[in-house]
Image (tube, grey):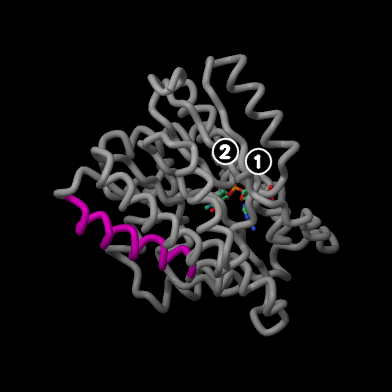
């Protein structure tokens, strides 16, 4: 194939935030990209940007990974391109903030499907593919929320603890097979995440936020080096270190509960959650 000289990377959740910057970083480092999410218009605009700025060949596949069949349909559509995939970024994800008992069970189920089940299925399909095609890199996006139980993000932080534990274990199993799995645990990052999670933060938190491009660059570099885990940013590293070595789990849980409590954070009425796009069909 003409365009097959550049290695191929797949990025989920590339229509905004850290995912769009993962695609930018990978394209700048010489990859062709498959970019996926539900909002196809955003993906097409990003594809045009990557082709213009980096000469990357970009394939857009619209897919809803919050649906049980989403991951297998996406994997089938990628493998139908007939090119070896060298880099997978499992980035798509969202959070639901607020009192657990008041949360919509359908939205929690969609979140668990996206953050855990689809991520696991994609990791399985693509690691098999990479083992059979001379190796590759997988980058999983967890969160600092994976370090301790987080009241008011109870289900979300548990999905990220799953991502972290599962990915570290699978990475160990794959260590002799040419495939590495790196887990990145970002802290507060300037993206649409907080709006989607319906979590209004005080202005004072802005100063703590990292920008998405920096997080994406740190993640891609760590994956290229085959690191098992990476936590971007000094404040996040410090928090990880404190929780791991100095803070009893009940204290860490209580601290997370105090800082995440909706009444403590909400300066204004909740913003409406992002409207869910129509579920598009992936290209065959
Ligand atoms: N921002 C933070 O502070 C922060 C901190 C720690 C971890 N993270 C993690 O970072 C990752 C990226 O989030 P972000 O901060 O960049 O937020 P974001 O700007 O809201 O991006 C989320 C991405 O996931 C996609 N997505 C959501 N639901 C989907 C579905 N059902 N099917 C397919 N794609 C879906 C979205 O695209 P569509 O809506 O177009 O489908 C979007 O591209 C997430 O896993 C998040 O948990 C973020």
Q: Is residue 4 left or right of residue 106?
A: left
Name the side, left or right, on which 46 lies relative to 216: right
- Report the front residue among 227 and 51: 51
Query: Image check: 110 left or right of 250?
Result: right
Residue 167 at least partly seen: yes
Label 1's element? loop
Residue positioned 20% across, 57% down in the render: 172
Q: Position of residue 108 (x, y in %)?
A: 63, 73
Examine the structure image and report whether residue 89 is included in the region drawn in magenta.
no
Q: Mark 1 vs mark 2: which is more N-terminal?
A: 1
Residue 165 part of the magenta segment: yes
Q: Residue at x 41, y 79 (%)?
A: 250
Q: Could you tell me how many numbered marks the image carries? A: 2
Q: Are marks 1 and 2 in contact (CB under 8 Å)?
A: yes
Question: What residue did someone put label 2 on?
Answer: 35
Query: Dot 1: within a 10 Å radius of its alpha carbon, few (fewer than 14), some, or many (20 or more) residues?
Result: many
């Amino acid at each position: 194939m003409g365009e097959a000289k550049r290695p191929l990377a797949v990025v989920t959740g590339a229509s905004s935030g850290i995912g769009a910057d993962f695609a930018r970083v990978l394209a700048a480092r010489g990859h062709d990209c498959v970019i996926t999410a539900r909002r196809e218009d955003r993906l097409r605009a990003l594809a045009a940007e990557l082709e213009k700025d980096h000469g990357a060949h970009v394939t857009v596949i619209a897919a809803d990974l919050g649906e049980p069949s989403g991951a297998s349909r996406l994997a089938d559509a990628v493998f139908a391109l007939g090119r070896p995939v060298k880099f997978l970024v499992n980035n798509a994800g969202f959070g639901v903030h607020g009192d657990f008992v008041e949360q919509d069970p359908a939205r929690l189920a969609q979140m668990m499907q996206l953050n855990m089940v689809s991520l696991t299925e994609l990791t399985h399909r693509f690691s098999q593919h990479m083992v059979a095609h001379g190796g590759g890199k997988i980058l999983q996006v967890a969160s600092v929320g994976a370090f301790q139980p987080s009241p008011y993000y109870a289900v979300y932080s548990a999905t990220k603890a799953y991502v972290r534990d599962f990915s570290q274990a699978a990475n160990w199993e794959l260590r002799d097979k040419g495939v590495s799995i790196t887990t990145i645990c970002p802290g507060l990052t300037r993206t649409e995440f907080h709006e989607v999670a319906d979590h209004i933060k005080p202005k004072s938190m802005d100063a703590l936020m990292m920008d998405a491009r920096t997080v994406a660059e740190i993640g891609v570099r760590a994956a290229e080096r085959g690191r098992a885990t990476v936590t971007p940013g000094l404040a996040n590293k410090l928090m990880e270190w404190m929780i791991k070595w100095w803070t009893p789990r009940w204290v860490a849980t209580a601290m997370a509960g105090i800082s995440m409590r909706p009444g403590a954070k909400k300066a204004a009425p909740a913003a409406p959650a992002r409207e869910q796009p129509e579920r598009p069909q992936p290209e065959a």
